[in-house]
Image (tube, rainbow, N blue to C red):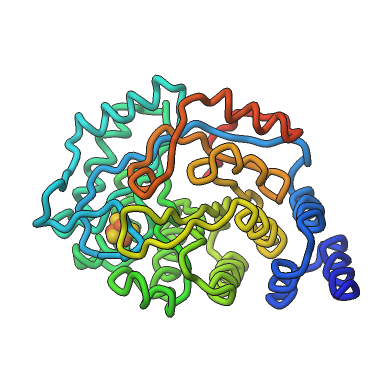
Amino acid sequence: MEKNLNRIASKVGNKERISRSDARFLFTEASDQLLSELATAAKKRFHAGDVATYLIMAIVNYTNVCVAKCDYCSFYRLPHQAGTYLLNFNQVCERIDALRAFGGTLVSFNGGFHPKLQLKDYAELFSRVRERYRGDLEFFEMTVAEFMFSCKLSKLTYDEGAAMLRDAGTRWVTGGGAEILDDAFRMRHSPGKFKVDDYFKAQNAILRAGLGSTATQVIGFDESLDERLNHLEALRTFQDSAPRKLPSFLCWTYKPWNNELGGTEISSREYLRWLAVCRIFLDNFENIRTSVLTQNEKGLEGLKFGANDFDLPTEDEVTQKAGATITHDFERILSAARAAGFKVQYRDPFPL
Ligand code: SF4
């Protein structure tokens, strides 16, 4: 075992790519200390080791109507169920104003697969919002998953849909809604959402149109290690030949409350170990982001396991409904980062 760990450590030290089996071996056999050291070495290819960047942001959930029926979701309501909502323009602006009062600079829109919203409806809403907050804020305007559904509903190809958003002024979507990019996982839990190949076709069209996007992963459902690795391998392969690079990868953890799937939350230690594997394996991603949203202060330990960046979220109904707790005591969170030995710096949104 020692010999194998030394071999992988040499690869990381020499800035060589590690294999899938190396990643598996690290995750199952390496000590926390070694994972932290290797992830920090991999991070230093891109970033000064002792600086962590962050921004304050809101995830504005403009509708909870969704027909995808993912069994791990605590947020959605079917169109005929009680408790559905669709925010109007003024209600969306109220949420954004609340973010601004916290000094936030990024709005990420995230809703559901609403069966009556065409892509042009999204484009119009986002245009009005951008016009109102012109230049003050950056917007992530849909997740890739929502984009895919809305294109299909609107009878648009992904190229046509991406062009429509771009021409309406959209700059970014996010890679959100990816959870675990493995078709067996998707069949078990969200057969109505998308197939993995299709997800990457949509990402490709978005990037080709000149928009920006991101990469994400959620762990801690019932996925196997192979399924997690399939996700990372697919992302790394995609990034190698993507029309433009995805600037960041964010991993967070599933919260098991108030949904059909349920289960038990994974430990923070498992999250941190996996985050280190992500940093080491995803050698073509500059920014690896740790999750305060699902890990609170413990997420800041992720800065020692390869992450260089994090959000301070002001709201996200999707994870809050599933059991996440959000604090607005940002100083407390930032103190945890400082206590972990990092200088924290507020950053601008990533350049397009
Ligand atoms: S995770 Fe997203 S797509 Fe799945 S049911 Fe929830 S809102 Fe719908």
The x and y percentages for residue 222 are: 47, 69
The x and y percentages for residue 18 are: 75, 70
**Residue extending farthest left:** 80
Quarter of image, res 236: bottom right
Q: Residue at x 67, y 43 (%)?
A: 301
Say above or below: 113 vs 349.
below
Q: Is residue 290 left or right of residue 82?
A: right
Q: Is residue 186 left or right of residue 227?
A: left
Q: Residue at x 44, y 35 (%)?
A: 326
Say above or below: 130 vs 156.
above
Q: Nearer the viewer, residue 95 or 72?
A: 72
Residue 248 in view: yes
Q: Is residue 261 left or right of residue 27?
A: left
Q: Nearer the viewer, residue 247 or 38?
A: 38
Split into 4 quadrants, where in the image is the N terminus?
Answer: bottom right
The x and y percentages for residue 52 are: 68, 36
Say above or below: 345 vs 189.
above
Q: Residue at x 33, y 24 (%)?
A: 97
